[in-house]
Amino acid sequence: CNPTIRQVRFVANFADFGGALFLDAQTRGNASPTLTDVVFDGNGARTPVAVWTTGGAIYVSVDSNGQTSGTASPTISNATFVGNQAARGGAIHLSTGGSGGIASPVITNATFSGNLAIAPATNPISYGGAIYISALSGASALRLNQVTFSGNQATGTNQLGGAIYATGRRATPVITNSLFWANQARSGADIYAEGSATATVTSTTLQQTCAA
């Protein structure tokens, strides 16, 4: 299902996975909508965060329980993500746990501001104040162009990736012509990559740090 969504505001929606949108492409499915002129404001993967909730605004999943996964690669432009929260991926969570799955959104001309990864009560670790990427079996080549990340934060005892957290050898985000400003985390205030994840950053201003 690949709908086109234009000029829509998603405000104060809550769910366990993806407060506003859950894009599910299991077993060769396709969930790649086009979103233009959209606002995601104050959405959350449950509140207060008590367990591993994911994707405050959007959750993208191509997990497949051992079967060949599908594709979930939304195209997002002229978008604002503000004040969303979850334990992993305050605004967006990308997960490609299934074999062959692809979750490679393209995001252009967007702002991520004041999104929070809030550590759950059961484990004081938070990942990716704005975006969380996990690519263990499938691939996630997120593309970001002309995107501003400001004031996003990972909280808790262990804070990983104030703006972006990426894990897995097939997590390969590409970031161009973008700005990272006043994001906060104990490790990787702007970008944190581990588990052989590789971020390619060009023509971009980072106020603070990347960590691996």
Image (tube, grey):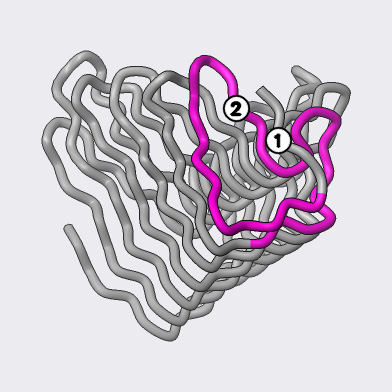
Q: Is residue 44 above or below residue 128?
A: below
**Left or right, residue 95 beside residue 73:** right
Label 1: state its secondary structure: strand
Q: Nearer the viewer, residue 47 or 22?
A: 22
Figure label count: 2
Vertical order, 173 against 76 (above or below): above
Quadrant where the C terminus lies? top right
> What is the number of the mark on residue 27?
none
State yes or no: discs 1 and 2 in contact (Cβ < 8 Å).
Answer: yes
Q: Residues within 10 Å of mark 2 (few under 14, many from 20)?
A: many
Q: Position of residue 94 (x, y in %)?
A: 44, 39
Residue 210: image tag: 1
* Residue 133 pos. (x, y %): 49, 35
* Residue 143 x/y as whole percent: 41, 52
Which residue corresponds to the image point at 37% horizontal and 25% vertical from the top-left? Answer: 170
Q: Which mark is residue 193?
A: 2
Rendering coords of residue 210 (x, y %):
71, 35
Q: In the depicted view, which residue is nearer to us: 8 or 171?
A: 171
Mark 1 neighbour class, 10 Å CA radius: few under 14, some 14 to 19, many 20 or more: some
> Residue 62's quadrant in the figure?
top left
User: In the image, what residue type sits under mark 1?
Assistant: Cys
The numbered mark, 1 or 2, whose residue comes first in the sequence reads 2
**Quarter of the image where one finds residue 66:** top left
Residues at marks 1 and 2, CA–CA distance in whole angstroms: 8 Å
Question: Where does the magenta region start and end?
Answer: 179-207
Instruction: State the image quarter where residue 7 is shown.
Output: bottom left
Q: Name the residue at 45% across, 68% down.
A: 108
Residue type at mark 2 is Ala
Q: Is residue 184 magenta?
A: yes
Please give left or right for residue 150 compared with residue 70 in the image: right
Give the residue furthest to the front.
Answer: 203
- The residue under the point 72% across, 44% down is 190
